[in-house]
Image (cartoon, grey):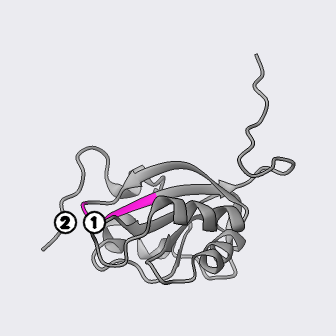
């Protein structure tokens, strides 16, 4: 049974994936979700190429810190990592604070969240700006 997709823009659009986006997948995608996220197979980048978007799939019991460090290493300068994981009540579910702790260890900070359907969610991560400590915010300018 195909899970219901939230109303509004498609999953790829919500994740910032368009026809020219270079996408890299890390981990094992949830069955049925990856084809609905990526736009075209030609977008897949080899491990050595920088990616605009890295889709990092996580489940409970998997090495989150190592997987996110690998994802960050494959990012283009302005790239983003979307950490995709099952929600509470699903097999392999993770709590968001577990993902955020692993992200911090990999030098990444969260900047958003997107539902991938009824069973999965994705947290958007970017590289921490140099000179900012974990949890610090840049000074506000007027």
Residue sitting at x 76%, y 16%? 142
Which quadrant, please, contains the N terminus?
bottom left
Residue 100 relative to residue 86: left or right: right
Q: Report the residue marked by disc 1.
A: 119
Residue 13 relative to residue 49: left or right: left
Tag shown at residue 3: 2
**Callouts 1 and 2 close, C-beta under 8 Å:** yes
| Residue at far right of view | 131
Residue 119 within the magenta-colored segment of the rendering = yes
Query: Badge 2: few (under 14), some or many (20 or more) residues near its Cα, within 10 Å?
Result: few
Closer to the chain start, of discs 1 and 2, is 2
Structural distance between the alpha carbons of marks 1 and 2:
8 Å
Looking at the rendered structure, the secondary structure element under dot 1 is: loop
- The residue mark sitting in front, 1 or 2, is 1
Residue sitting at x 57%, y 82%? 63
The percent position of residue 126, horizontal first and vertical second, equals 65, 55
Magenta segment boundaries in residue numbering:
118-122
| Residue at far left of view | 1
Q: Is any part of residue 21 visible from this angle?
A: no
Query: Badge 1: few (under 14), some or many (20 or more) residues near its Cα, within 10 Å?
Result: some
Q: Is the magenta stretch mostly helix, strand or loop?
A: strand
The percent position of residue 79, horizontal first and vertical second, equals 64, 58
Examine the rendered structure and indicate whether residue 28 appears above or below residue 8: below
């Amino acid at each position: 049974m195909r899970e219901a997709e939230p109303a509004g823009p498609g999953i790829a659009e919500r994740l910032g994936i368009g026809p020219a986006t270079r996408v890299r997948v890390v981990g094992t995608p949830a069955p049925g979700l990856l084809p609905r996220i990526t736009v075209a197979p030609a977008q897949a980048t080899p491990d050595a190429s920088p990616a605009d978007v890295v889709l990092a799939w996580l489940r409970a019991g998997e090495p989150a810190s190592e997987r996110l460090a690998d994802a960050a290493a494959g990012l283009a300068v302005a790239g983003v990592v979307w950490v995709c994981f099952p929600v509470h009540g699903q097999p392999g579910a993770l709590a968001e604070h577990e993902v955020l702790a692993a992200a911090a260890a990999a030098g990444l900070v969260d900047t958003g969240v997107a539902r991938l359907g009824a069973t999965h969610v994705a947290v958007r991560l970017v590289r921490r700006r140099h000179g900012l400590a974990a949890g610090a915010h840049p000074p506000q300018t007027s």
